[in-house]
Image: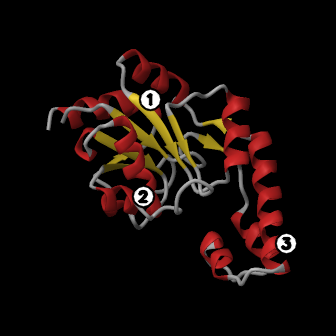
Amino acid sequence: MRLRGIIFDLDGTLIDSQLDFAAIRCDLGLEDGELILEAMDAMPDGSRKDESLAILQQHELRGAECAKLMPGVANFLSELKRRSVLVAVLTRNSAETTELSLQRLGLEFSQVLTRDDVPAKPDPTGALRICETWQFAPDEVLLIGDFLFDLQAGRNAGIRTILYAPGEIPVYADEADFTLRHFDDAVGLLASICQQ
């Protein structure tokens, strides 16, 4: 593989914003396990939807204000820059909270796409747009994320995926092409991928 770019998920992959999804669902009046963005998209326009968006935004802003880099991320991003591998972010977070997180943590990417810019993952639109802007073929790019929707978005775009799983291996791990347990191991994993 000729690796020219990496698309990263943001929360849960590059950063930990300690979002409490159970609390978000509770505040929104959603059922346990219900998909938050999809439930909000299904709401008719009106006061409930507006209030729900405001509630979600407040949770995400609090998360952005306390977000921390995942261990090993800073060194890995520095190594990618040294190797001239382009990096982008594709996140289901809002543009405002994403920008706040990136500015606070001093992170820079050639492209950043949020749910305000493109349909949310697992829709492949964002991943494909990043490839098109870079003028890279999907098989020259990797997508790294911690959730099923990241893996589905990559597969739907024809991009190989890496599941970031620092804790318990999730049930959807077999959806990924590769698994990364710690960013300290990422350079070695890329070396093995590029030799395939």
Which quarter of the figure is the C terminus placed in? top left
Q: Earlier in the sequence, mark 3 or mark 2?
A: 3
Q: Rate crowding at label 2 as few (under 14), some (14 to 19) or many (20 or more) other CA atoms within 10 Å.
A: some
Give the quarter of the image for residue 64: top right
Q: Of all residues shown, which one is farthest toward the left?
A: 196
> Pointer 3: what residue?
51
Q: Rate crowding at label 1 as few (under 14), some (14 to 19) or many (20 or more) other CA atoms within 10 Å.
A: some
Which structural element holds mark 1? helix
Judge left or right: residue 125 versus residue 66. Answer: left
Q: Of all residues shown, which one is farthest toward the top?
A: 82
Q: Rate crowding at label 3 as few (under 14), some (14 to 19) or many (20 or more) other CA atoms within 10 Å.
A: few
Distance Cα–Cα, label 3 vs label 1? 41 Å
Point out residue 46 in the picture as x, y percentages from the top left corner.
80, 80
Numbered label attached to residue 125: 2
Which residue is located at x 39 percent, y 66 percent?
Answer: 172
Q: Earlier in the sequence, mark 2 or mark 1?
A: 2
Q: Of tags 2 and 1, which is closer to the observer?
A: 2
Which residue is located at x 51 percent, y 42 percent?
Answer: 89
> Pointer 1: what residue?
184
Distance Cα–Cα, label 2 vs label 1? 30 Å
Point out residue 55 in the picture as x, y percentages from the top left corner.
82, 65
The image shows residue 172, relative to residue 130, as above or below, that is below
